[in-house]
Amino acid sequence: MRLGPKKNFFVLENISKSYGENHVLTEITLYVNEGEFVCILGNTGCGKSTLLKIMGGIELPDEGKVIFQGTPRERKNTPASQSCFGMVFQKDQLMDWRTVYENVRFPLEIFGVNGADGPSRVEEILDVVGLKKFGNLYPRELSGGMRQRAAIARSLVHDPNVLFLDQPFDAVDAISRKALSFELLDIWRKTSKTIVMITNSIDEALLLGGRVVVMSDAPSSIAGTFEVGLLHKEKTGDFRESQAFWSLRRKIRQTLECRQLCEEAV
Amino acid sequence: MNKRDAFAQKVPSLGNMVDLPVENIMAPVLKRAWMKKFLYPMILSGCLVALWQWCVNFFQLPGTVMPGPLSVVRALRTNFGNIILPDLLFTLKIIAAGYAISILTGFLLAALCSQSKWLSRSIAPIAVMFMVMPTIILIPIFMVFLGFSPIVRVIVVSLQCAPIIMLNTLAGFTAMEPSHLEMLSAHGCSKWQIFTKYTFFNAMPRIFTGLKLGCIISIIAALGSDFAMGKTGLGYRIKISSSMVALDMVFATIIVAALLGIIMFEAVSFIEKRVIVWR
């Protein structure tokens, strides 16, 4: 067990963002503790990807602050500022001209961890995601699920503190999706990383997240936060049949739908 | 070899079984691929040549109207060493020099233009202008300054070939996927890192498109400038032979020029396959 996880490890304060006339995010405040698995849930187009991009430093907020470990983020990304983060995107973003091994090694090249333990580190992480035998293949030779595994391996290889996942399993078939979800849960348990994941599936959010943050439709703010709490520990196959799961599921669904109805009424 | 290993790895349970039969299974397939590429076109060309010879014989066409393939081969055999080969070497030198200069300037200009939209917008129309201009009308301009020097032909070949290499390379450099750029930004990559680790490789297929087109254009431009000036070169040989009504010689030279083009194009394609192994 880790001792004393830091509270408010990653903080978003009053984040607003708009693209021209289009207001995407308004006044979003979110606290993430160290070692927490937070799922952000919202309907399509509600700006949840934008929120994650702001967290990962890809986009800058118009207003508000992003604070990591007590210090505000720099405005420009550098390898030094980004080496604490790992990111998995909706599409895998593997580079076609690199083999799986070389793709996974990419962050080490950028962050300068390319020392003696580089190769063994890559091998190790490929083993974790079950791609050890496929290191020499090019991305086009892999299935969608395997590509996404490679992308996950790439996000973990430099041992980041925080992992951002933007609907990572959307491009994956249903069976791989479930398997990958459980593997991600496993990785989280083993490595105790802080994970923020975006999803549009309530079940996935409940299965993975220790806390589920529901976003309203654009211009979005946070509609509600739900602690999955204790349930977290006993997340196994029959977790979905428990009473607690269904009542929580209903509540989240209501929050999502209620917001939709309100917007329509206005 | 790599692919077979990969396949054996994908199906670990079959690993041992796969080892033996693969070669036996693959052999006819490989043969068939070879046949498709070379044998079928050769059969067709053979039939056409036979038809050609038959027509010449049947209609008793004189060599001044239409030489038969046999007399073309005869002309090629008697004149290759002493007449066509020096011309071929001369044109080859012009092509090589012009192509090399075009590759260098094309890459350099593309790299510059990729850094500034303003620059690429101002250079692009000029590049297109030189590319579409007929070779023959460029020649007289440079002959005013440089006379009959072979440098004129090299300049003309470069002027026509460099733009197509530049425009394709530029298209490669600028065709970056926004989602990939986000991934690179998430790693905090510098501009130089983005270029060396992403843009350059991403542009590779388009760069080779440019190189292949440039190779064709440089041959066309070199032969065209032979036509327009000078007393050597394959183009000149075709022109002079046709004015002397030595049609067998014209056809022989055309065959040499065509073979030169095919060999150059295939050479660039071969290099492309060696470089772009990930496709």
Image: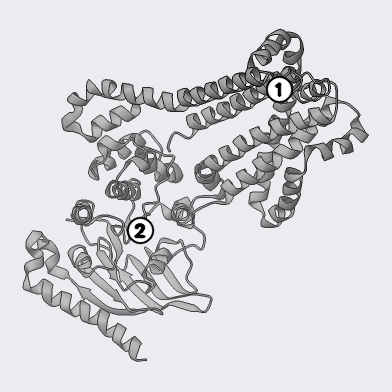
Which quadrant holds residue B84?
top right
Q: Front-most of B117 and B236?
A: B236
Q: Residue furthest front?
A: B59
Q: What percent of the width, then of the height, locates residue A256? A: 26, 79
The amino acid marked with disc number 1 is Met
Helix, strand or loop for disc 1:
loop
User: What is the quadrant of the N terminus of chain A in the image?
Assistant: bottom left
x and y, in percent, of residue B226 in the image? 79, 27
Label 1 CA crowd tier, 10 Å (few <14, some 14–19, many 20+): some
Q: A67 or B270: which is nearer to us? A: B270
In this rendering, is residue B134 above or below B83? Answer: below
Q: Residue at left 56%, top 50%? A: B191
Parent chain of label 1: B
- Identified at 73% across, 30% down, the residue is B98
The chain that hosts pointer 2 is A
Residue at 34% of width from left, 52% of height from top? A160
* Residue at x 37%, y 22% (from the top left corner): B31
Q: Which mark is residue B66?
A: 1
Using the numbered discs, state the Cα–Cα distance from disc 1 to disc 2 in whole angstroms: 65 Å
- Which of A126/B46 is in front? B46
**A180 relative position to B76: left or right:** left
> In the visual, does A183 lie left or right of A89?
left
Q: How is the image coloured?
A: one colour
Report the front residue among B25 and B278.
Answer: B25
Residue picked out by circle 2: A90
